Image (spheres, grey):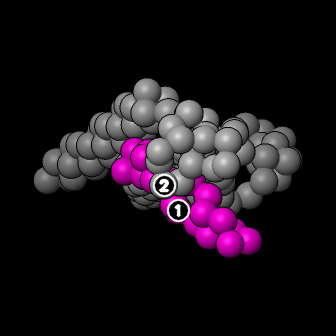
Amino acid sequence: MSLFNGFNISASGLTANRMRMDVVSANIANANTNRAELVDGEWMPYRRKTVELSQNGASPFANQLQSVINRGNTSVSGVKVSEIKEDETPFTLSYEPEHPDAGEDGYVRSSNVDPLKEMVDLMSATRSYEANVTALNASKSMFMKALEIGK
């Protein structure tokens, strides 16, 4: 285990949660976008995006095998953004026959972004970001105390 492994783990958490906050911000900004993508000559509304995180480095099986070999000394290496996926929930339909994007039946397809759900995701990402900052500051203060011992 490296001396700076704690810093690297906190940095990976900060990066991943920053990406989560960016994606949530993009979702909120495009919540009312009805013309986000042109598919087969037809405009499609904005589709909500989500961030998928995974463990950075070795696979869980490799970690389990390594922990058995090392008798409990696991190698933890943080998280990474593995994929940004589109949410496949159906679009919201509203009856607005005078809207320029209304179909022949008078319904308008709107984005599948739920602002309440986005706010919950944003709060979760913010709290995780703050937890990583706290862990980083704790690691930094431990190094500073260790340096004071050497004086």
- Answer with the quarter of the image where residue 56 lies: bottom right
Q: Specify whether residue 127 is painted magenta.
A: no
Amino acid type at circle 1 is: Ala
| Residue with the mark numbered 1 | 36
Q: Is residue 36 visible?
A: yes
Q: Position of residue 68 (x, y in %)?
A: 84, 41
Camera-side residue: 29 or 7? 29
| Residue with the mark numbered 2 | 100
Say few, some or many: other residues with alpha carbon within 10 Å of mark 2 (under 14 / 14 to 19 / 20 or more): few
Residue stretch in magenta: 28-46
Q: Residue at the location (27% across, 48% down)?
A: 140
Q: How many marks?
A: 2
Quarter in which the N terminus is drawn: bottom right
Say few, some or many: other residues with alpha carbon within 10 Å of mark 1 (under 14 / 14 to 19 / 20 or more): some
Q: Residue at the location (53% across, 41% down)?
A: 97
Q: Which is closer to the viewer, label 1 or label 2?
A: 2
- Answer with the quarter of the image where residue 11 lies: bottom left
Rounded to the nearest whole Å, what is the CA distance between mark 1 and mark 2?
15 Å
